[in-house]
Amino acid sequence: MTAKSDDPWSEIQASPPGPRLNGRLVAESRPWEIFRALDHLGRRILFLVHARATTSGIALPKIAGLDVEARVRSEDDKGILSVTLENADDADIFTRFTDDIIETVAAARDEVTAVQSFVGRMWKWHALLKGGRKPTLSREVQLGLIGELWTLLNIVAPSRGLDTAVVGWRGSQRAPKDFELSELCIECKARGAASRNKVRITSEHQLDDVPGHQLILLVHTFASTGEEDVGALDLHEMVGQVRSAIASDAPHASKAFEAALEDAGHDDTHEYEVIVLHRAFDAYKVQSGFPRIVPGAFPDGPIEVAYDLPLAELSVFHMSERDFNDQLAGEG
């Protein structure tokens, strides 16, 4: 009796020459469609089938030994995201790499997040295989990450629990919404108190509706300060506060939080120059009539849309503290 191989590609037949792949669906990826396949040269491939519009604005990594590609399937206009192993000698690490992608994508709440997760894991492995010191986060990214962590610790955790807040934090994975919770999605923006009264929306997916979920735009206002001032926050301080809370109240969430920090680009050895005080936050209910650009708004283009949203135009959508807290608690 022949022992069954642990190689998930071992019983897959090679595809014919050309763009069409004879793939085997990965059951663990459901409801998303990830397939394993071999091309006509016998090279291992992992690919995701998705709606074409969900790849808007995505940059793909270049990884030595791998061919990463995004294309459109002609017969049904579906998008295909694929990664091909060029050297069979690396089969073992490719299996671990693709298993990591499958596990992450399977947890995605919607297809946009599934696509972002597929690409996000490739970027993480790109950094891992490339080695070396991670680049320091820009000032804008530092402030945005402080805002997301402030939301996690001081808004979501008190209402939903710290472990739920950690699991629901998706911004670090380049997901379209920063927090995905039961029946609620939150998109966070952080602005300086002295800056113009607007926020930057970086994708047409950020304020798009999510079926079965209320979407809230949460805008934090921070003031620049010195490190000696009471309440001063830099990224290290904000991360330390979340870590302390997790160690005390939800130690089982530590691994997930550290993985998310890694995805976000945080590095304990870096120096971060953004030091701020949290002044206020404002919540806006994204609903019918809300000024926004979403996928399909312009059927013939443009795509990869970024735009400024004046906060003065959002007063009718501003939520009271009570309404926001009710929505956060699932009572809205």
Image (tube, rainbow, N blue to C red):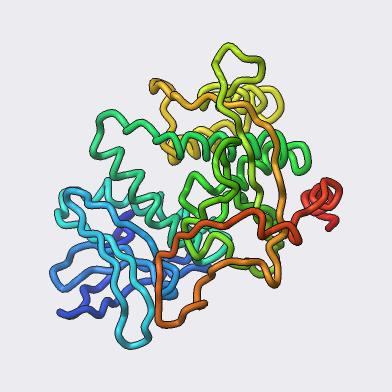
**Can you say whether 92 is above or below 1 in the image?**
above
Provide residue 24's location: percent of width, then percent of height: 36, 71
Residue at horizontal 27 percent and vertical 76 percent from the top = 21
Provide residue 162's location: percent of width, then percent of height: 69, 36
Quarter of the image where one finds residue 238: top right
Left or right relative to 4: residue 225: right
Q: State the residue in front, 65 or 134.
A: 134
Left or right relative to 322: residue 190: left
Residue at horizontal 44 percent and vertical 24 percent from the top = 273
Provide residue 68's location: percent of width, then percent of height: 25, 59
Residue 313, can we see it? yes
Residue at horizontal 38 percent and vertical 62 percent from the top = 57
Quarter of the image where one finds residue 81: bottom left
Left or right relative to 169: residue 24: left
Q: State the residue in front, 225 or 35.
A: 225
Residue 28, can we see it? no
**Can you say whether 199 is above or below 157 in the image?**
below
What residue occupies the far bottom of the structure in this picture?
75
Left or right relative to 143: residue 152: right
Provide residue 222's location: percent of width, then percent of height: 61, 33
**Can you say whether 299 is above or below 145 in the image?**
below
Quarter of the image where one finds residue 332: bottom right
Q: State the residue in front, 14 or 155.
A: 155
Residue at horizontal 57 percent and vertical 36 percent from the top = 194
Which image quadrant: the N terminus? Answer: bottom left
